[in-house]
């Protein structure tokens, strides 16, 4: 069973360009989370998606950032008009759907991350 | 909102010794989960250990154990018989409980642990 896959692993963009980061969840997982790790910092939550729905985007910057998780295909984190401050490692995690009515926990499995460098 | 604090930016210990990493958190939730993640130089996030807040017994996983003090909102990680492969960044994380079990993780700033041969 393949783990969470992210591509590209490394992405270099010049200021003003667009960055597209892809995340393929583990088989059977329908929930995807995106986290950003700035240099020498911990991971910070950005957005949580289920298939075709954004559930929680409270950590997403209001401008230039968007995310989607279509019915078919990977989840995409899109950053328009990148700036140097966007340079970071972007991690995707996936989890199984929960069981309704039960207080439970579904482990998030992390991908290897995409390191974005903005020149 | 939840906060997670790790007050030790860096630690080092001799191989085979025991080391304890500290973590405190703040929340008004009663149902939640706490985690320690390891991030080696490869940057892959690896779950080390998990603690359910409703369980009084401290979680253990081989050489890794936690000291969970719910009233004090403290969650420390003890690594026994430390090995060179334990060298990594360690992040404490919080997740609130929910009916569906799918919530975001809130991470601390991390502790860089170096095991000295």
Image (spheres, coloured by chain):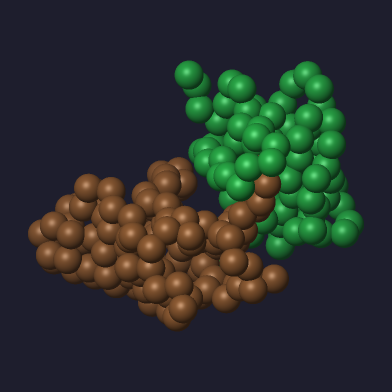
Percent coordinates x, y for residue B9 in the rendering: 40, 74
Chain B is shown in which shade? brown
Residue B17 position in % (x across, y down): 12, 65
Image coordinates of residue A1 in percent, x first then y, are 48, 19
Up/down of B1 relative to A105, above or below: below
The color chain A is rendered in: green
Residue toward you, A55 or A63: A55
The residue lying at 55 percent from left, 30 percent from top is A4
Q: Is residue A93 visible?
A: no
Quarter of the image where one finds residue B10: bottom left
On-image quarter of the N terminus of chain B? bottom right
Rendered residue at 42%/52% (across/down): B50
* Foreground of the two, B55 or B14: B55
Relative horizontal placement of residue B49, taking residue A71 as reference (left or right): left
Which residue lies at the image location 72% right of the left edge and 26% below the top edge?
A74
Residue at horizontal 28%, vertical 58%?
Answer: B65
Numbered disc total:
0
């Amino acid at each position: 069973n393949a783990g969470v896959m992210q591509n590209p692993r490394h992405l270099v963009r010049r200021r003003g360009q667009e960055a597209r980061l892809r995340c393929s969840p583990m088989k059977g997982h329908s929930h995807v989370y995106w986290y950003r790790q700035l240099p020498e910092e911990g991971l910070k939550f950005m957005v949580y998606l289920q298939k075709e729905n954004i559930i929680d985007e409270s950590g997403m910057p209001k401008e230039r950032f968007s995310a989607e998780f279509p019915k078919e295909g990977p989840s995409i984190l899109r950053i328009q008009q990148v700036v140097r401050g966007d340079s970071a490692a972007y991690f995707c995690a996936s989890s199984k759907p929960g069981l309704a009515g039960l207080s439970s926990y579904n482990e998030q499995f992390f991908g290897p991350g995409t390191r974005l460098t903005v020149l | 909102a939840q906060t997670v604090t790790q007050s030790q930016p860096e630690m080092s210990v001799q191989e085979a010794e025991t080391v304890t990493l500290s973590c405190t958190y703040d929340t008004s939730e009663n149902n939640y989960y706490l985690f320690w993640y390891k991030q080696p130089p490869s940057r892959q996030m690896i779950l080390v250990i998990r603690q359910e807040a409703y369980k009084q017994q401290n979680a253990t996983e081989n050489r890794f154990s936690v000291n969970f003090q719910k009233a004090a909102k403290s969650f420390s990680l003890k690594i026994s018989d430390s090995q060179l492969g334990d060298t990594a960044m360690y992040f404490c994380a919080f997740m609130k409980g929910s009916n569906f079990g799918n919530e975001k993780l809130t991470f601390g700033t991390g502790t860089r642990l170096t095991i000295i041969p």
